[in-house]
């Protein structure tokens, strides 16, 4: 939302705004997604394709979760930022691009630089005008506004008029810690709009929706029997069961399953392959 505001109120507002989630792109497709490719440059490249930098030429590219880009791609991104040109996979010709870059991350990139997992030169190339967005729990005045916005959105989608929340229900929303920030708030309002009855969402409905969103601790016996315990196998069984349940709850949509388990998409894919649980839906 901040990136879109920057775009919409700037001189590039009439040009494209292209957003991409860096954590959701398989490592092998990074270069193709960013820079495009030529037909026949790799298996499955059945036609020419422009990358996001060409698509957004003259406008804004929003790189969400920039801290998750693979190390071997960081130097290529740095070159594009410095040279303002891209070369498609399989091609030899450079194409000039004029884009504004807005990048976001929930990681401490300075720490990542110190640990060697993020290039220092790329960090300073991106960190020109830092904009820190405080967590939702530190800007409680935004909660009623965001609640009203998402309520309007989801009341249309569920096909019934919802006038708002009761004062008690709204107070519950304001007092909640919102560790998942705006995404978590939207998820709660979507659920409440679906489950609520009548024109006003009551406190008990919000209570139920908030409780479902709170991460919980699993009660597991830690007693060790006389014959010992296969710790690795035991932990693998727990992990596999959680993966299966998350996939079922999300109807096989990997992005939603990853959010339920508080994993990034790449980590989820790794675990699905590990347990042979891969599904087609992204």
Image (spheres, rainbow, N blue to C red):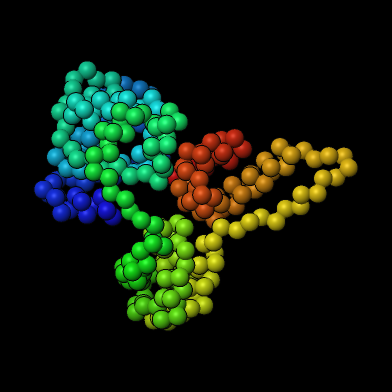
Spot occupied by residue 68 in the image (x, y as percentages of width and height): 41, 37
- Assign the N terminus to one quadrant of the image: bottom left
Q: Nearer the viewer, residue 92 or 209?
A: 209
- Of residue 88 and residue 214, the one placed in the foreground of this image is 214
Q: In the picture shown, does residue 66 fall above or below 184?
A: above
* Total numbered labels: 0
Report the front residue among 134 and 59.
Answer: 134
Q: Is residue 123 above or below residue 162?
A: above
Is any part of residue 221 visible from this angle?
Answer: yes
Which residue sits at x=69%, y=42%?
A: 235
Query: In the image, is 16 to the left or to the right of 241?
Result: left
Q: Residue 212 appears at what percent x and percent y?
A: 54, 64
Residue shown at 34% from the left, 79% from the top:
163
Instruction: Report whether residue 31 is seen.
Output: no
**Quadrant containing the C terminus in the rendered view:** top left
Q: Residue at x 15, y 35 (%)?
A: 98
| 226 vs 217: above or below | above
Q: Position of residue 8 (x, y in %)?
A: 17, 53
User: Residue 257, how many percent across, how many down?
Assistant: 51, 50
Q: Is residue 1 left or right of residue 272?
A: left
Asked where in the image residue 51 lies, by quadrant, the reply is top left
Q: Residue at x 20, y 43 (%)?
A: 60
């Amino acid at each position: 939302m901040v990136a879109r505001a920057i775009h919409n109120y700037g001189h590039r507002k009439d040009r494209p705004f292209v957003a991409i989630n860096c954590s959701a792109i398989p490592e092998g497709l990074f270069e193709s997604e960013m820079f495009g490719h030529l037909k026949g440059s790799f298996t499955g490249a059945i036609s020419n394709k422009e990358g996001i930098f060409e698509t957004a030429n003259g406008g804004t590219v929003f790189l969400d979760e920039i801290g998750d880009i693979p190390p071997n791609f960081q130097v290529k991104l740095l070159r594009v930022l410095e040279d303002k040109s891209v070369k498609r996979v399989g091609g030899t010709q450079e194409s000039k691009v004029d884009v504004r870059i807005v990048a976001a991350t929930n990681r401490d990139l300075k720490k990542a630089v110190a640990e060697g997992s993020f290039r220092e030169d790329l960090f300073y190339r991106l960190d020109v005008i830092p904009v820190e967005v405080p967590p939702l729990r530190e800007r409680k005045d935004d909660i009623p506004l965001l609640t009203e916005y998402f309520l309007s959105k989801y009341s249309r989608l569920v096909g019934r008029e919802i006038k708002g929340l009761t004062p008690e229900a709204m107070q519950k929303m304001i007092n909640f810690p919102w560790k998942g920030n705006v995404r978590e708030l939207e998820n709660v309002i979507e659920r409440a709009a679906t489950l609520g009855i009548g024109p006003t969402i009551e406190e008990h409905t919000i209570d139920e929706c908030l409780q479902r969103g709170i991460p919980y601790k699993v009660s597991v016996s830690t007693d060790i029997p006389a014959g010992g315990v296969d710790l690795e196998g035991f932990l693998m069984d727990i992990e596999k069961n959680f993966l299966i349940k998350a996939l079922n709850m999300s109807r096989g949509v990997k992005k939603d399953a990853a959010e339920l388990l508080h994993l990034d998409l790449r980590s989820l894919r790794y675990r699905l392959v590990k347990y042979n649980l891969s599904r087609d839906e992204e």
